[in-house]
Image (tube, rainbow, N blue to C red):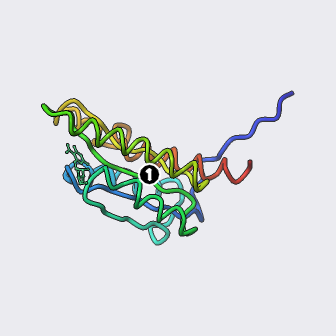
Amino acid sequence: MAKTIEGTMDAQGLKFGILASRYNDFIVGRLVEGAIDTLKRHGASEDEMTVVWVPGAFELPLAAKKMAESGSYDAVIALGAVIQGATSHNKYVAGEAAKGIAQVAMQTGVPVIFGVITPDNLEQAIERAGARLQNRGSEAAMSAIEMANVLRKL
Ligand code: INI
C-alpha cells in the first residue's frame, strides 16, 4: 500500500505570521479576525501570532519575504481584498500579489498562504469575509495549519 503523508490540523505550538493589507481594511480586518479565531480553535496560542499591516495587497510579497526569512514563523498568512473595479489597476495589484506570494514560498520554503480575495463587488467582499464557514481568512488559516504540519513530515 502506498505510504500517505498528510498534515494534521493541530496548531498547538505553531507560530503564525498574519500579514494584512490596509486597503479595504473594513473587509481585511474581518479576514484577520477569521484567521485568528480558526488558529485558536485548532490549538494555537494568540501569544504565538503576530499581525503585521502593510498599505495594500501589492506590498504583501515583500513583507511576507522578510517574515518568512526571519525564521520566526511556521507559516505566514497573507490577507487582502482587491475589489474589481472600473480600472485595470486592481488586476495588476491582485496579479502581483499572487505571483509574489507564490515566489516567496518557493524561495524560502516557508508556507505563505494566499488569502487575498478578489470579489467583483462590495457585496461579494462582505460575503467572503463573513462568519466562520464563509470567511476566507479562516480558510487561509486552515491551509496554513495543514501546510505547516505536512512540511515537517517531508
Ligand atoms: N490594494 C489593495 O489591497 N486592494 C485594492 O483593491 C487596491 N486597488 O484597487 O487599488 C489596492 N491598491 C493599492 C496597492 O496595493 C498598493 O498599496 C499601491 O499601489 C502602492 O504600491
Q: Position of residue 154 (x, y in %)?
A: 74, 48
- In terms of image quadrants, where is residue 117? top left
Q: What percent of the width, then of the height, locates residue 33?
A: 33, 55
Percent x, y of residue 30: 27, 51
Identity of the residue drawn at 23% across and 37% down: 125
How packed mark 1 is, by other alpha carbons closer than 10 Å (few <14, some 14-19, many 20 or more), is: many
Asked if residue 87 is positioned above or below residue 32 in the image, the reply reads above
Check the image and name the residue furthest to the bottom: 47
On the rendered image, what quadrant is the N terminus found in?
top right
Q: Nearer the viewer, residue 58 or 80?
A: 58
Q: Nearer the viewer, residue 104 or 119?
A: 104
The single residue placed furthest to the right in the displayed view is 1
Label 1 amino acid?
Answer: Thr
Location of residue 137 in the rendering, given as x and y in whole percent from the top left corner: 37, 47
Where 48 falls versus 110 (above or below)?
below
Determine whether the beta carbon of the residue marked 1 sits less than 8 angstroms from the nearest atom of ligand 1: no
Report the residue at 20% width, 33% height from top: 88
Q: Specify the farthest residue to the left.
A: 86
Residue drawn at (19%, 52%), measured in percent from left and top?
26
Q: Which residue is mark 1?
A: 38
124 displayed left or right of 98: left
Mark 1 lies on a secondary structure that is helix
Q: Is residue 73 left or right of residue 55?
A: right
